[in-house]
Image (cartoon, rainbow, N blue to C red):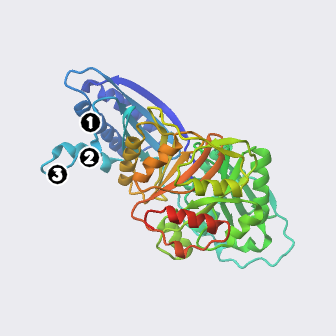
């Protein structure tokens, strides 16, 4: 689960007058230059922005109607983003056709060609057009000779385990590259400077094991997600082949658990053991991680074929190691009560069931993020209001344009609107896959919508308690 950190560089609120477009574009050019975007890329970005503003001026307001629209420039990880917001007449620009009979869609067609990603979002708060330009390309790495070296025979090597140092971030990137090439889903690990900065900023806690000669022998990390405060995911685990008989990953795991509990003071730590064999599930059970659901068809084909010589998307289990157990009220749709209650009971979570409410808030509180590497979209909904069906529909339209293959939905079951949220999601073929508990903001019911994907449940290999949870999930899958 990737962590998205946003840094706002500037916001402009400007009147809907064509004469002032160049003022906006000049500001964008200046900011983009400071982030080392090449001139040709800046020109493409400003042209796309001009087309997006043209959409607002042409379709959002009546002729001579005076209003304001807003342009925000921000950085999220390695993306330079332009967001154009307006409260004009509802109009879905994404549905504008472009052909010899529909020239009005030419501007939207251009936007898709000029930048790396385009989103259109309609909600009760107005409309957003989002333009994304990637700041950097993946660095060049060559496969390390360590991959081909024979395993060491010395049984008495003493390794040093410590928090990552700046000069070690390149070696970590190379370790990940040796194991996964460019298919690991947490893309930032390939950029040593950015990765180390993320570690310094508290977005990642990176732990390395080094041999006496200073070589990085292994790595394991906790990654934090701004949408799931209070918990972290254990991942980016890799050990160089020649060091694999020294139980380095076992020691790294013990130490990272101690960090999560006693240094970061988290409520819990979760992991994702694979579901195409049961070895990591056995290890998780021994470590005390509690099964809480599945991430079905999670990995993209590139990652999976690199590891398993397969062209199908693979599935993962999800488990949680809890460090706290405060009492919480939860609200579960009738279809998912069996799943929710079985996970809560098995984990001895201190939870009480609340009653369904009939009065909803008017506006939903939700967020969308898209992982282009995994072709995976995530929607987090803390409050599902009366507009939830419209909001979800518009999210799905944006996700389809990104060619994502799976949508994960996270519903805060500690808010009474959770029942309404799932009821609406069912209309779009979402089905529950588990519970991710212990975030500061709530426990989240996880659900998925498979975009042209079908799960071969009989091919999954699980042990208890994963097998029992999977049986319930399978019964909820509309494809079954």
Residue sitting nearer the eye, 142 or 103: 103
The x and y percentages for residue 334 are 53, 51
Left-right relation of 390 to 19: right
Foreground label between 1 and 2: 2
The x and y percentages for residue 112 are 31, 49
Q: CA distance from mark 1 to mark 3?
A: 17 Å
- Residue at figure coordinates x 53%, y 43% from the top left: 418
Element under label 2? helix
Is any part of residue 141 visible from this angle? no
Element under label 1? helix
Q: Say which mark, if any, is on residue 99.
A: 3
| Mark 1 surroundings: few (<14), some (14-19) or many (≥20) residues within 10 A | some
- Give the quadrant of the C terminus: bottom left
Residue sitting nearer the eye, 277 or 447: 447
Q: CA distance from mark 3 to mark 2?
A: 13 Å
The x and y percentages for residue 325 are 74, 46
Residue sitting nearer the eye, 474 or 398: 474
Q: Say which mark, if any, is on residue 447.
A: none
Q: Which image quadrant for residue 341?
A: bottom right
Q: Which image quadrant for residue 50?
A: top left
Left-right relation of 313 to 146: left
| Residue picked out by circle 2 | 95
- Residue at figure coordinates x 76%, y 60% from the top left: 288
Left-right relation of 179 to 419: right
Residue sitting nearer the eye, 85 or 346: 346
| Residue picked out by circle 1 | 55
Q: CA distance from mark 1 to mark 2?
A: 12 Å
- Quick one: label 1 or label 3, which is nearer the N terminus? 1
| Mark 3 surroundings: few (<14), some (14-19) or many (≥20) residues within 10 A | few
The number of callouts visible is 3
The x and y percentages for residue 145 are 64, 73
Is any part of residue 105 visible from this angle? yes
């Amino acid at each position: 689960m990737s962590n998205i950190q946003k840094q706002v560089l500037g916001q402009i609120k400007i009147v809907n007058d064509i004469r002032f477009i160049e003022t906006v574009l000049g500001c964008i050019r200046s900011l983009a230059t400071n982030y080392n975007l090449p001139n040709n890329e800046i020109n493409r970005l400003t042209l796309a922005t001009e087309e997006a503003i043209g959409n607002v001026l042409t379709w959002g307001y009546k002729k001579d109607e005076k209003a304001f629209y807003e342009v925000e420039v921000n950085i999220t990880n390695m993306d330079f983003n332009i967001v154009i917001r307006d409260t004009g007449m509802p109009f879905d620009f994404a549905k504008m056709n472009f052909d010899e009979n529909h020239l009005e869609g030419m501007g939207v067609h251009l936007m898709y060609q000029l930048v790396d990603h385009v989103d259109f979002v309609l909600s009760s708060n107005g409309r957003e057009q989002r333009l994304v330009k990637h700041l950097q390309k993946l660095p060049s790495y060559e496969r390390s000779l360590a991959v081909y070296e024979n395993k060491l025979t010395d049984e008495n090597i003493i390794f040093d385990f410590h928090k990552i140092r700046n000069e070690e971030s390149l070696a970590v990137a190379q370790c990940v590259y040796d194991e996964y090439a460019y298919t690991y889903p947490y893309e930032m690990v390939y950029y040593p400077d950015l990765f180390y900065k993320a570690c310094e900023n508290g977005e990642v806690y990176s732990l390395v094991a080094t041999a006496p000669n200073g070589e990085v022998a292994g790595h394991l990390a906790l990654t934090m997600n701004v949408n799931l405060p209070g918990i972290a995911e254990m991942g980016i685990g890799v050990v160089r082949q020649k060091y694999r008989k020294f139980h380095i990953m076992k020691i790294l795991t013990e130490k990272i658990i101690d960090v999560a509990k006693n240094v970061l003071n988290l409520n819990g730590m979760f992991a994702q053991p694979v579901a195409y064999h049961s070895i990591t599930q056995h290890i998780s059970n021994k470590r005390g991680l509690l099964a809480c659901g599945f991430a079905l068809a999670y990995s993209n084909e590139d990652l999976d074929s690199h590891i398993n010589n397969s062209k199908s998307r693979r599935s993962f289990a999800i488990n949680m190691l809890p460090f706290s157990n405060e009492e919480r009220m939860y609200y579960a749709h009738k279809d998912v009560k069996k799943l929710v209650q079985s996970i809560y009971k098995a984990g001895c979570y201190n939870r009480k069931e609340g009653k369904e409410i009939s009065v909803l808030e008017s506006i939903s509180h939700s967020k969308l993020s898209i992982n282009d590497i995994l072709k995976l979209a995530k929607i987090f909904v803390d409050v599902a209001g009366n507009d939830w069906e419209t909001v979800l529909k518009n999210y799905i339209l944006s996700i389809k344009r990104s060619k994502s293959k799976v949508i994960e939905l996270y519903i805060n079951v500690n808010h009474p609107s959770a029942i309404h949220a799932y009821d609406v999601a069912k209309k779009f073929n979402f089905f529950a896959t588990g519970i991710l508990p212990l975030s500061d903001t709530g426990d989240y019911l996880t659900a998925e919508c498979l975009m042209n994907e079908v799960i071969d449940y009989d091919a999954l290999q699980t042990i208890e308690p994963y097998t029992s949870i999977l049986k319930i999930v399978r019964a909820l899958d509309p494809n079954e």
